[in-house]
Image (cartoon, rainbow, N blue to C red):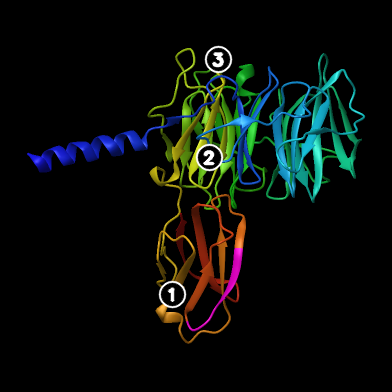
Amino acid sequence: MKKTLLSILSFLSLTTFSQWQSTPITFQGQDCISAFGKLFSSQTNFNNLDVSTDEGTTFNPSNTGLSSGVRLGLVNGPTLYAFGGNTIYQTTTGNNWAAMTSVISATDAVKAMAVMNGTVLALTNPISGVNSKIYQLNGASWALRSNFNGILYTTIKNLNNTLYAGSSATCVLKSNDAGLTFTNSSTGITPLTNFFDKYIVTMGATSSAIFCSTLGGRVFRSTDAGATWSLVYNIGNGSSTLGISDFLITSSNVILTASDSGFVYSTSNGASGSWVKDNNGLAKVNGVYQTIKLALTPNYVITADRDGKIMRKSLVQLPLGINENTTNSFVSSVYPNPATESVNIEAVDLQDELNCDVVVRDILGREAGNYKMLNGKVRINLQSFNSGIYTYQISKNNTVLSNGKIVVN
């Protein structure tokens, strides 16, 4: 009887833990981003921008210097950008936002941002009319880079070091000159008569493929840099908006998506049939999930929905491809794991190898440390590491020999 009760309690605990969890942000969180080791959420319709230093457990206002609601743009080096209307803001701390000097007309609104070759770009669309523009950041001010009459771009993205744009009618366009000119790159994206299926919402890239999504709920994949595309996922019904709003690609090339069908992911490079929904505990808005933005913290995947709710789920409950000792040639071990102050990585079969490198990365793929392995062993000081899940990779002469994971408490 006691064993049965313990089994039931364990099952209930696991079920609860595997669900999406609510956070204090239940109204003003239609956008989210991770920066400076913190989680930010914002609401475009109100001057609400909040920050969490504990991965969504608590939030505090972080809107000093903002005059209206903003969308969170991107992180470039030490700077986080946000935008609202024709104004772009910047911060290096997550608070004390400063409006940047701009030449963007009051009749235009910033739509999206991207970084190409270290230069920050901003896409604008007119409040009324059809005339997209791209501005580039020169020093501390913005300057017009390109002007496109008669077309509306919906987004711009740096996909594997090439700039792509989505549009409201001509699908995907590609630029080989960092946004000065674009050419149509939509072969294979079915030009259906339904407006929703021609409207590109967002784009993303793994190391070997690029993806675009439509307002009608279709995901297309290209493995030849946009020359041709194939349909790999579809939640649409052909007559309404059931869109996929955001792609987030992990360092191990797992594709996470936010959509009107909820949270969907693929661990197989987006291949058809590999997409999995995980909505247990997610809130619905008017009968559908309507998740629109994703972020990753060291221990959680974060979602934001159209109703302003921020939800989170533990990464250990998701198959994000962080697997110790994969198909590489040499077995390595980690101890202690989890660790707090320091961790040892040991590969017995590499005791006689010299000049082996060990690179440690966080869940976003950012390098956290680079070390030399001596006699098959390395000891890593974790004092500067935030809590979370990290991956390590042992290599020699650019050949990967072993990899695994480290959990830092």
Q: Disc 1 marks which residue? A: 346
- Look at discs 1 and 3 and give the one toward the viewer: 1
Q: Which residues are magenta?
A: 369-375
The reply to whether the magenta stretch includes residue 31 is no
Q: Disc 2 marks which residue? A: 55
Query: Is 184 displayed left or right of 51 in the figure?
Result: right
Q: Disc 3 marks which residue? A: 240
Sequence-first disc among 1 and 3: 3
User: Residue 138, labelled with which disc?
Assistant: none
Hey, which quadrant is residue 124 in on the image?
top right
Q: Amino acid at mark 3?
A: Ser
Q: Is residue 267 visible?
A: yes
Query: Is 255 displayed left or right of 121 in the figure?
Result: left
Q: What is the total number of numbered labels drawn onto the structure image?
A: 3
Q: Name the residue: 51% across, 26% down.
A: 24
Hey, which quadrant is residue 105 in on the image?
top right
Q: Residues within 10 Å of mark 1 (few under 14, many from 20)?
A: some
Instruction: Verify CB contact (< 8 Å) between mark 3 and mark 2.
Output: no
- Look at discs 3 and 2 and give the one toward the viewer: 2
Q: Is residue 226 above or below residue 340?
A: above
| Percent coordinates x, y for residue 139 in the rendering | 90, 45
Disc 2 is placed on an element classified as loop
Q: Amino acid at mark 1?
A: Glu
Disc 1 is placed on an element classified as strand
Residue extending farthest left: 1
Q: Nearer the viewer, residue 356 or 94?
A: 94
Q: Nearer the viewer, residue 42 or 52?
A: 52
Q: Residues within 10 Å of mark 2 (few under 14, many from 20)?
A: many
Disc 3 is placed on an element classified as loop
Q: Nearer the viewer, residue 5 or 127?
A: 5
Q: CA distance from mark 1 to mark 3?
A: 55 Å
